[in-house]
Image (cartoon, rainbow, N blue to C red):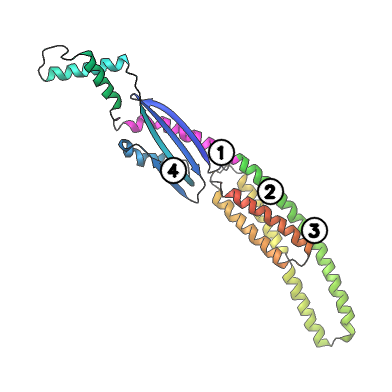
Amino acid sequence: MPRSMTGYAKASTTISQKQFSVEIHSVNKRGLDLHLQLPKEYLFLDIELRKWIAAVASRGQVTFRITTETSTDISTDLLQRVDVDLQTLAQAVGFKETRPYDFAFLLQEAAKYTSMSVSTDLIEQIEPIVKEALMIWNQAKEKEGVFLIKDISNRLDHITKLRNQILSYKEKSSTRLQERLTKALEELETKLLDEDRRRILKEVVLYVEKADISEELARLEAHLEQFGHLITSQKMEVGKNLDFFVQEMLREANTIAAKANDAELIHYVVEMKGELEKIREQVQNIE
């Protein structure tokens, strides 16, 4: 199911006494534009994070932010670990005392441990929380996509009805045009020379051919069908194709409007173009 490019997600975890928060926010954009905001000591994660994001998104302006907060809680386990490290270091440099430091110093060193940079194995440690945030983000985009597709589908149904109305009216209009031209020619019949008659008939044929919108309506029907298949497909990255078909449908509508020689026919086309413009706005948000 197509999804929106607009979404937001947040996930948090604790790694080595640090609270890590991952936030993702995205809006629509023609291509994939990534903006990573990382603490200076974690800039080495940039390349890997870009790979993870690009693996699940193809379009949109994405802001990815990691913030950290050092825990002020010093656990018993941490104190014991620091104590062992200090004793090992003291023995290595020749101190004979079992603990050549007091408890206040131990607390001070433990506090330093909580503020130390996490080692480069952070990539493996942080991967689960990043993947969780990406999953929540995509779920938000899919949910928004459902609303977009529902609105587009309703407008597509309306355009199909307008297209059928134009087709029906076109057949009646063609009959009336033919009757008017026939009557006019009959009135002129006695006054025309053979050469004039042939020239007028050629002009009439050309006029009728130029006013015919059968091909435009056939192409419009094909575009509507292909567009409908795309918005109901299981593909997630269809935004560019949808945009292409909207442009083509607008092109056909404009051609029909240019050929229209009837006020009611023009009314249908204007209403159709209004719906297509609204669909084009919605399509700009689809990935």
Q: Main secondary structure of the magenta part?
A: helix
Q: Label 1 to label 2, Cα distance in Å?
A: 20 Å
Is 218 left, or right, of 188 in this rendering? left
Circle on res. 155? 2
> Between marks 4 and 3, how big is the CA–CA gap?
48 Å
Which of discs 2 and 3 lies nearer the camera? The answer is 2
Residue 13: x and y, percent?
A: 41, 26
Determine whether label 2 and label 4 are within 8 Å by CB.
no
Q: Earlier in the sequence, mark 2 or mark 3?
A: 2
Assign a secondary structure to mark 2.
Answer: helix
Task: Note whether 107 is above or below 169 in the view shown.
Answer: above
Q: In the structure shown, which secondary structural element does the residue marked by tag 1 occupy?
A: helix
Q: Residues within 10 Å of mark 1 (few under 14, many from 20)?
A: many
From the image, tell me which residue sits under label 4: 54
Residue 18: name its quadrant: top left
Task: From this view, report whether residue 161 is shown above or below residue 106.
Answer: below
What amino acid is labelled 3 in the image? Ser
Tell me, for residue 142, which label it has, or none.
Answer: 1
Depth check, mark 2 against mark 4: the one in front is 2
Q: Which residues are magenta?
A: 117-145
Left or right: 136 in relation to 253: left
**3D distance between C-alphas at marks 2 and 4:** 32 Å
Callout 3: SS:
helix
Amino acid carrying label 4: it is: Ala
Callout 2 crowding tier (Cα within 10 Å): few <14, some 14–19, many ≥20: some
SS at circle 4: helix
Sequence-wise first label, 2 or 4:
4
What amino acid is at disc 2? Arg
The residue pinned by badge 3 equals: 168
Q: Position of residue 267 (x, y in %)?
A: 75, 59
Residue 50 in view of the camera: no
